[in-house]
Every structure is written in structure tokens, then in C-alpha cells.
Amino acid sequence: GAGVSQSPSNKVTEKGKDVELRCDPISGHTALYWYRQRLGQGLEFLIYFQGNSAPDKSGLPSDRFSAERTGESVSTLTIQRTQQEDSAVYLCASSLDRKHEFFGPGTRLTVL
Amino acid sequence: AQSVSQHNHHVILSEAASLELGCNYSYGGTVNLFWYVQYPGQHLQLLLKYFSGDPLVKGIKGFEAEFIKSKFSFNLRKPSVQWSDTAEYFCAVSGSSNTGKLIFGQGTTLQVKP
């Protein structure tokens, strides 16, 4: 595609439910990143995928968070047993060279 | 600890005023530095970046930034802002030899009054 796409654009869920967020990177981009932006704060790194290498999960805030990516395609970020503090905009970015990241529009998650 | 600090959270300027947004970072080793911008209703996009060489870098729409290594700073400047520069601006850093994952500042909201 022309850019990074994410779905859904908005998600409202109840505390304790699981949610799955999707990211479609730019075709050919081997690197994929997930970030989180809570209200009034900067973006926080969550996880990084590079090709078929083991992902860098150092930014995941708890074991309720997980992400998968098959090859160099779509990635899904899953949050289990959501909490109110998980409310944020979740941004995905992809990169060809790990020097310039192209960001998607984000998924706004609201946990009631 | 690795961190980025943006001094101004909300800046209001009139058109044609000069702009300088402060950014300081804490990061061990050689760094790559970035400014990203998010216009209302749009995606986050790259404004400019510094990897090496001339510490004064020029980006899109007349923006420039200067890397001052001794001050761990990468301030963003524009001599004359326009109403269309109203946006949120983020400074970010990554290690030059690592995965490219970015550490962001909290962001600065710039409002330009016509």
C-alpha cells in the first residue's frame, strides 16, 4: 500500500476484555515498530520486529501485552485483560532501513 | 537512563514570528536525532533528521535544527512561522548502531495565530 495502515481506528472496550490491533506496513519494509502514546505524553516504544529475527520486546509494559508478525507482513498487537491505564493511541511504524520510520494513523483505544 | 526532554509544552505565536523549540536528550553513545510533526488530523511525519556531518540540518517547509553535541541539544528553528505550521512537534533520538527504535520527547503543541 501507499502508507502504513492500522485498524480499527477507534476501539472502545470494557475493562478485562482482550483487544487485538492490526498494522499493515508499507510493502517491502522489513522493520516494524509499535509505540503507545498516552494522553499528554510522548510516544513510548513497545516492540520491534526485523524480518525473521527475534523481536525486541523490551518496551512491553506487562505480560498482558504481546505482538506477532508473520514474515514481513501484517502485525497484530494483543492486549489481554485490558485495564483503564491501557487507554492510549497505539501507533505502528515501518521502515526499510531503520533510519526513517513511516507512521500509521494509530488506533485510539479506550478502556471503560 | 535514556530520555528526551522538550522544554515547551505549548507555544503560541503570531504569523511571521520566529520559532525555536528546545530539545535535550540523554543517551549513551552516538545518536541519530529527529524531529517529527503531526498536523491536525494527519499522521506523524518526519520533519528532519541528523545522522552525521553538518550539525545544522534543514528539513521540509523551512525548518532547520542544530545539533550541539556539548549541550546534548537538537533545537528546532524556523525564522518565520505560518498559520499552517500549527501542529504538534516531537523530538526523538535513537542509537546510531541499534534497531532504530525511537525515544520521544513529550511533544510541543504549536499554535500559530493568523
Image (cartoon, coloured by chain):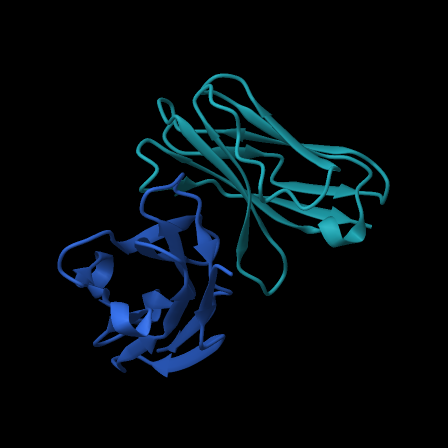
Chain colours: A cyan, B blue
Q: Is residue A88 left or right of residue B93?
A: right
Counting from the top left corner in percent of width and height, residue B63 is at: 23, 65
For residue A59, above or below residue B57: above
Q: At 36% across and 74% down in the image, what residue appears? A: B22
Residue extending furthest toward the front: B29
For residue A107, above or below residue A74: below
Q: Is residue A77 left or right of residue B86?
A: right
Q: At 33% across and 51% down in the image, what residue appears? A: B46
**Number of numbered tags placed on the structure image:** 0
For residue B57, above or below residue B114: above
Q: Is residue A78 left or right of residue B101?
A: right
Counting from the top left corner in percent of width and height, residue A14 is at: 84, 43
Q: At 32% across and 31% down in the image, what residue appears? A: A96
Q: Quadrant of residue B64?
A: bottom left
Residue extending furthest toward the left: B54
Q: Is residue A100 left or right of residue B105?
A: left
Counting from the top left corner in percent of width and height, residue B10 is at: 48, 76
Q: Could you tell me which quadrant the C terminus of chain B lies in?
A: bottom left
Q: Which of these two is toward me, B30 or A70?
A: B30
For residue A44, above or below residue A41: above
Q: At 46% across and 69% down in the image, what residue appears? A: B5
Q: Which of these two is toward me, A56 or A1?
A: A56
Q: Which of these two is toward me, B113 or A97?
A: A97
Counting from the top left corner in percent of width and height, residue A27 is at: 38, 23
